[in-house]
Amino acid sequence: MDLTLGLVGVHAPNYPVNLIHLWNSGPDEAHLSVRLRPGSGVGVPDLKERLRLAFAASLPEVRVSFEPSDLVSRVMSFGSATPIEVAVSGPNLADNREHARKILERMRAVPGMRDVQIAQALDYPSVEVSVDRERAGLLGVRVTDVARSLVPATASSRFTVPNFWADPASGVSYSVQVQVPQARMTSLEDLANLPVGAAGPRSGTLLRNVATLTPGTTVGQYDRYNMARVVSITANLSGRDLGSALSELESIPEVADRSLWPARTRVDLRGQAVPMRQLADGLKTGLGVAVAAVFLMLLANFQSLRLALVVMSSVPWVLAGVAGLLAATGTTLNLQSAIGAIMAVGVAVANAILLVSLAEQARREGLAPGEAAIRGATSRLRPILMTSLAMIAGMVPMALGLGEGGAQTAPLGRAVAGGLLAATVATLTFLPAVFAVLAPRSAGSPSLDPDDPESPRFQKEDPA
């Protein structure tokens, strides 16, 4: 390890600092950030798995969650601590908790999900103080007196009686607080012997004389979303892509079937699920719009539906090459690989235009479509190979994922390399055959523009 940063619990109540500035949600939580030494050779996913096993064996009652520390993952999770979060919200906390418990059991059975747990502390240890009002009244003790004695003994008086003292010399205000030292409050017996009551001759009554103290549990943290109480189930992933895990998560009946939800309760997926769905839909739309725009430009350039279809016949080969190399290398379809697929489509279409343009020119000169296709392929063999191989060679270092952070950009390089490999082979072998089948049989231009001299519909101007 090169550097560690740890924080256990929260600061003492006598420090007037808002807890919102801390990472931890309460004294029951600890945070530890670790930075590995460069060149250590330690794989982070394997290290997480080993630590999970070690913690489960030595600390079975401790909940552990390995949360991402990089800025990109935090931003893409949109406030969620983990990539996957299922939020059960509604006005009834008991119903939310029971439904979240059912989802929790289902999620623990999903392969690849780790650290599945409820994010909030719903069973936080507490001490229930039941005041006997009749006895307290006989002793002259009010419930307000009990509360004002308990708060300084367990926390600080600043939570109930804010008091500030202004220094006359400097004018700086200081918070004045009353707090019983924590070393004197170590058990229920110490708390039961706490003096309570108003100042005066009847003061000095012990808490045990007016109240009963019993250990219990309470909700340690209330989370709300749109004013509704929320119970969140968080989970990490190990050895599995986010898309397949979300698909299996969305198939859980308690998540997908609204009829199983309690009244006025809803279940929402958060974390990276929302941006991933939006990204996938946007990429599908973007790829379709790009292909349609290229097709329309080809149609306008060649003025022939058949020639435009010949050029576009290379696109399926690009997508097949991208999918093939991603599958062979165990790479998922993500933002980087989708961008690489679009790049590969652009280069493949450019190579196809180069071949079809020369073949069409040869066909207009009188050659048969098959012979014109062969001439186009042989004449443009070197430019197409040089363009594709140069692009593939430039993507090899990126595809190997070498160096720090190389794994994040490796899908882009692999998508471009796989798509161009398949597209180059298809352009030089399959595309000429498609041209020979779809190209017009008659010599001359297929243009319908009456102002084009090569068009059969060209109208000569009358000399008169």
Image: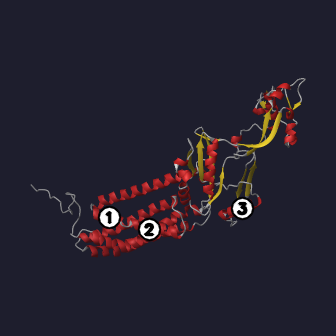
Question: Outermost residue, top direction?
Answer: 200
Callout 1 crowding tier (Cα within 10 Å): few <14, some 14–19, many ≥20? some
Q: Where is residue 399 in the image (x, y as percent from the top left)?
A: 54, 67
Nearest the eye: 15 or 302: 15
Report the residue at 60% width, 56% height from top: 106
Which quadrant of the figure has residue 190? Answer: top right
Seen in the image, is 78 located left or right of residue 153?
left
The quarter in which the C terminus is drawn is bottom left
User: Label 3 to label 1, Cα distance in Å?
Assistant: 56 Å
Q: On the rendered structure, is 42 left or right of 423? A: right
Q: Label 2 belongs to which residue?
A: 320
Mark 3 or mark 1, earlier in chain: 3
Q: Nearer the viewer, mark 3 or mark 1?
A: 3
Q: Mark 3 points at which residue?
A: 51
Assign a secondary structure to mark 2.
Answer: helix
Image quadrant in which the N terminus is located: bottom right
Question: Horizontally, is 351 left or right of 79 in the view?
Answer: left
Q: Visible in this render: residue 156?
A: no
The amino acid beneath tag 2 is Ala
Tag 1 residue: 309
Nearest to N terminus: mark 2 or mark 1: 1
| Picture quadrant where residue 292 is located | bottom left
Q: Which of marks 3 and 2 is in front?
A: 3
* Residue 105 rendering spot, x and y as whole percentages: 63, 55
Amino acid type at mark 3: Leu
Mark 2 or 1: in front is: 2
Residue density around tag 2, few if under 14, some if 14–19, many if 20 or more, within 10 Å: some
Q: How far apart are marks 3 and 2 (CA)?
A: 40 Å
